Image (cartoon, helix red, strand yellow):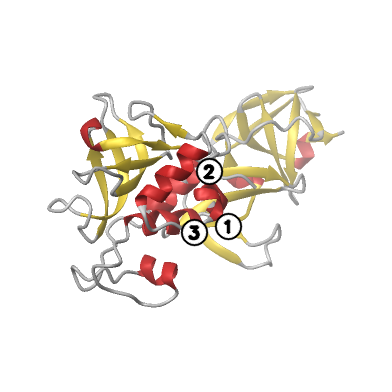
Amino acid sequence: MKITAKTVLETAIGEIGTKEKPAGSNRVKYNTWYYGAKVSGSLYPWCAVFVSWVFHRAGASKLFCGGKKAAYCPDIENYYKNTGRWHAKTDGKKGDICLMDFGKGRASHVGIVEKKNPDGTYTLIEGNTSLSSNDNGGCVMRRTRTLSVIRGFGRPDYAQETTGRITIRTRCRLYKKASAVSGFYSSLSAGTEVEYISDTKTGWSKVRAAHTGIMHTGYVKNSCLSGRPDLSGYRKGTICVLSAPLRAKNKKSSRKLGTAKKGTVFTVVSVGKFWTNIKYKKTDAFVFNKKIKVK
């Protein structure tokens, strides 16, 4: 499965504030992962190691340097140049790998682009930086960089992001399988944005979501999602009474979203014991089972 830039960025952003301990030691969890043991000292700077770790944790290792770890910034730059995925300093995009030089005459620092700003600067998520030391500061931070220090950008072969926002409409659990008895990773709050992957057509959607900085791939009930993509392969239904209220949740006391007249055709997302989750025009709603007929 290909990964979007959004997935990698969410993983990186979740690490903001992480510091090496003690200060100035380069002893940090990213180096422990990279070298397979706790290391410290001046031989172990970790800005590139941090980027390697982020892609690994996001399930996107193959998008970074062809699946290889990298601790040396020039190696990262050379990989993207040699594979035709190197872009000029004025052409950075979200998720790009930004190589920088602070006076050494070569790539000596690296971060991940969060956004390009209107004034031409870039907001990056970087490891081993600080306000007092750009490229050896010991902390994961959000930094703003000007073109004067940027050498260029490596662009991983990300998957195209789904158009529109796919969000959690009501608090729910992210299950390990498409079953409410399969165990779950976390609870997702209403308004949480998730990466839509696919629909099981059994009332569940496969998604990726961040929880405490860690990306999980799991399943949520279709009734918990707003903004799902095309449902053209789903069954159709019709309103079989004079009119039927469309509710925000599967409760009579839930907020009324509108009313559908007899004969109205809709898409069936999932069917419950008493309520059916439908898609009508651009509205996700619930309608009482006795008021509909499913084809």
Q: Amino acid at mark 3?
A: Arg
N-terminal of the pair, mark 2 or mark 1, is 2
Q: Nearer the viewer, residue 290 or 154?
A: 154
For the point 49% across and 59% down, which residue is it?
A: 57
Q: Are marks 1 and 3 in contact (CB under 8 Å)?
A: no
Q: Residue furthest left?
A: 132
> Picture coordinates of residue 216 (x, y %)?
55, 57
Q: Is residue 139 above or below residue 192?
A: below
Horizontally, is 249 left or right of 147 in the view? right
Mark 1 neighbour density, 10 Å: few (under 14) some (14–19) many (20 or more): many
N-terminal of the pair, mark 1 or mark 3, is 3
N-terminal of the pair, mark 2 or mark 3, is 3
The Cα–Cα distance between marks 1 and 3, rounded to whole angstroms, is 18 Å
Query: Mark 3 sits on what residue?
Result: 57
The Cα–Cα distance between marks 2 and 1, rounded to whole angstroms, is 13 Å
Mark 2 or 1, closer to the camera: 1
Q: Nearer the viewer, residue 284 or 53?
A: 53
The part of the image, by quadrant, that contains residue 17 is bottom left
For the point 31% across and 50% down, which residue is it?
A: 126
Horizontally, is 53 left or right of 172 in the view? left
Number of callouts: 3
